[in-house]
Amino acid sequence: MKRKAGLLVLLCVILLGVGCREDTSAPPPPGPEAAMPAKEEGPFPLEETTVEGLQEAMVKGTLTSRRIAELYLARIEALDRKGPTLASVIETNPDALSIADALDKERKEKGPRGPLHGIPVLIKDNIDTADKMMTTAGSLALVGPAPAKDAFIVERLRAAGAVILGKTNLSEWANFRSTRSVSGWSGRGGLVRNPYALDRNACGSSSGTGAAISANFAAVGVGTETDGSIICPSSTNGLVGIKPTVGLASRSGIVPISHTQDTPGPMARTVRDAALLLGALASADPQDKATSESAGKLPADFVAGLDAGALKGKRLGVLRGPFVGYSPKSDAVLEFALGKLKSLGAELVDPVELPHAGKYDAAEFEVLQYEFKTDLNAYLAGRPGLPVKTLADLIAFNDKNAEKEMPYFGQELFLECEKKGPLTEAKYKEALAKARRLSREGIDQALKSSRLDALVALSGGPAWTIDLVNGDHYLGSSTSPAAVSGYPSITVPAGEVAGLPIGVSFFGTAWSEPKLIQLAYAFEQATKARKVPALK
């Protein structure tokens, strides 16, 4: 049975036949202050540099926040808009350098605010910023006025001293517009390409964040996930990605699909960097009631306690069944990872059955269709100055602008969602109850019955070729159990197939992020599986 890699390919899996043609549109130019030389001279000085490394350089005075931002912006200009043309960054922040200047001044006068002070961060273009950048979810329908207010997680990032360097491209509407879409394509930004092989898909819907952070266009990035949209692009782009417990980080000010499954999360080149960014994102938000459940459940620091020996004595359940068999070469990466886990002192229960796996897929899809219409209408109603206020308006906009918005695939899913009624309907309530019960029971029972610390599975297969005739050649993933239950998962690079990265995922029950991060860190330190992408 083929498994979903998330909303990025949710619909491709349903119909298993995606038709499209090559996008020839170019991303918009960077902001005026961000314009940089189009060609890099010599090795990139910040290649694979960590957040901690950047902080050390700023403390020593060998780098400033402004210089770091300049270097990243120059690299974006040279390699994202020209050269390999990854199209991963949809827009750069025209105020990035002035913000960096202010943070450099503050550092001299008062000292740093924390570990993200002066650190450039890229965020997905479905996250609101009340600045000179737009928030469009990749759609031309939202081009124009900026949101009136920052998303709550953007407020958190700014308060932590991060420099919002720009917005990343994505699968338009987080790939919830058509049953025949291509992962990583948006009407506004074009098609994101995988930095490990330009003829390969970057996966989605956080494709732009995945490709950009892997290509060293910023220190760290923020993606969003409903089902697989952080984990898949992280795995296929050689990154660490954390899909938090729903409610750990606020969704207010983020273009929604589903209030029961949506969550933002960090994407980074190391576990430590991902954990640092998660600490900045995590906080209760009065505008997002789901975050009230985090009270008393969040650590003061997700980095504290990271230990290369954390796997010793831990019991891990190995998920096989529908989560393997994508290809012999992919399975070989899993076997390597399991061998490494054993050598690090972990006790493997292999295999462990995950009760109800695959039995709630249809219920999940039903829930997403209902919630998308309701949640998107509420979001659009709060965006002043836009020409669209409802899903029905978006459908009409796409029809009117079909040449630009629908040259490769349509909006079949929009049409299906528009037919859905309110969330008071029995069909919605029944589907939600089924999806939640079966997904949560499955993970909790597996953990309890075998006395496990966490579950481990192959995150997915390697990046597929960009096939503009037949569409995504998607193999499968293990993302759905954690996504539907609202529980956390973390993917970490584990190996490669023909130079294409593959990750393994650790996941567990609600609010188990600290434990999962520790396990992933120990595995990462022992394997160092991430390799710098070739960009060709």
Image (spheres, grey):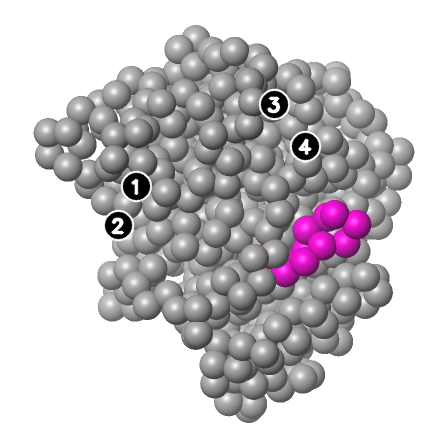
Q: Amino acid at mark 1?
A: Glu
Tell me if residue 422 can be seen.
Answer: no
Residue hosting label 2: 286
Residue for point 56% across, 22% down: 42
Q: Which amino acid type is marked by label 2?
A: Pro
Query: For the residue labelled by badge 2, is the local secondary structure a helix, a strand or a loop?
Result: loop
**Is the N terminus in the top left, top right, bottom left or bottom right quadrant?**
bottom right
Q: Is residue 99 left or right of residue 534?
A: left
Taking the image as shown, residue 309 lies to the left or right of residue 104, namely: right
| Magenta residues (range) | 491-503
Q: Amino acid at mark 4?
A: Leu
Q: What is the CA distance from the residue labelled 3 to the residue labelled 4?
A: 8 Å
* Label 3 – label 1 distance at C-alpha: 27 Å
Which label sits in the foreground, 4 or 1?
1
> Alpha carbon of mark 2 to alpha carbon of mark 4: how far?
43 Å
Cα–Cα span, label 2 and label 1: 35 Å
User: Disc 1 designates what residue?
Assistant: 56
Q: Position of residue 194 (x, y in %)?
A: 69, 37
Image height of 228 relative to 27, above or below? below
Which circle's residue, 2 or 1, is located before the other in the chain? 1
Label 2 – label 3 distance at C-alpha? 40 Å
Helix, strand or loop under label 1: helix
N-term-proximal mark, 3 vs 1: 1
Question: Which residue does the numbered mark 4 point to in the structure image?
Answer: 535
Say whether residue 413 is visible: yes
